[in-house]
Each structure stands twice: as C-alpha cells, then as structure tokens.
Image (cartoon, grey):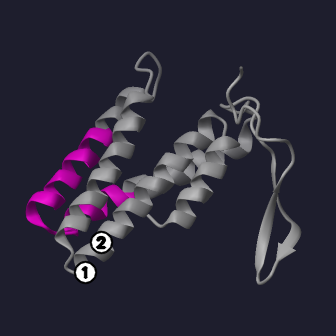
Amino acid sequence: MKDELKKEFARRIAQANPVSMITILYDMTLIYLEDAGKALEAQQERRFVLEIHHAQDCLMELINSLDMKYEPAPALYALYLYMHKEMANAVISSSAEPLSQPVSILTRLRDAYLELEKTGSFEPVMDNTQQIYAGLTYGKGSLVESVAQPAGSRGFLV
C-alpha cells in the first residue's frame, strides 16, 4: 500500500464511526489483495506473500471485532475464516486464483456496510480528533489540507 493511501486511511479512521471502521478494513483488505495480484504479475514472490499477510491481518482484526452474541456474527466469522484459508492457499500455490472468491465476498460485504453507513447515525469511534478541511488553501500544484484545531491530544483524552 502506498504512503498516500495510508495517509488517506489514517484520516478516514480519525473521523470514523463503528460501521465505517468495518468498511475501512474491507477497503484495506481489498487494496492489499490487489497489490498482491500486482506483485505476482511482476514476479515478486516476497511482496506477494507480504501483501497477503497484510490482508490476513485485516481479516483477523475483523474477526476480533465480532461479538458472537449477535447475528450475523457467526456467519461473518465463518466467511472470514474461509477467506483467510483461501488467502493461505494462494500463498501456498503462489497463485492469485484462490483470491477471486475472497475479493468477491469482500466487495459485496463492503457494499452492504456502505449502505448501512447511509441509513444510521453513529457516533465517531475517536473523541477529540482534529477536524480536517481540504480545499481551503492551495499549494503550488497541489491541494493543501488545513487542521481546524491544534494538535494537542490528537484523539486521546488527557
């Protein structure tokens, strides 16, 4: 994942609510799988394995966030384990073919959570974060972001 995308995800996470955090993890997993496919095409075996491991780490975060007392957590758990296994099969076989099913599942889940984000009003996960405004000022050849409050505690209550 490129540094620019990492910064974008950091901004999204700072403003995220519980549902959008899941959407962000789906997005990150899909990007890691896409990068794994590119690495395999470029015959970069180590990078392929590394990107798959990053995607599996995202899946493990999703698994750990499940509350098994509520539906559809058991079904999601089974799906996440299946996708994790398929990613391991991709590493073992050095092939992107086993990744097609996880990509399809993740895309549909991501779309469902995007719809859920639109229907509900959820509180942000992090309190006391900086508000970021893009487009208020411009740099030479680029858009500059402005921060609305000082970087005192950056999301952590003191």
Left or right position of 88 against 127:
left
Q: How many marks?
A: 2
Residue 76 shows up from this direction = no
Q: Farthest residue to the right: give it.
A: 136
How many other residues sit within 10 Å of disc 1, few (<14), some (14-19) or many (≥20)?
few
Residue at image point 68% right, 31% down: 126
Q: Amino acid at mark 1?
A: Glu
Residue holding disc 1: 41
Say which of 106 and 29 sits in front: 29
Rendering coords of residue 63 (x, y %)? 37, 33
Q: For the N terminus, which image quadrant? A: bottom left
User: Bounds of the magenta span?
Assistant: 79-104
Left or right position of 17 against 85:
right
Residue holding disc 2: 37
Rendering coords of residue 31 (x, y %)? 43, 62
Label 2's element?
helix
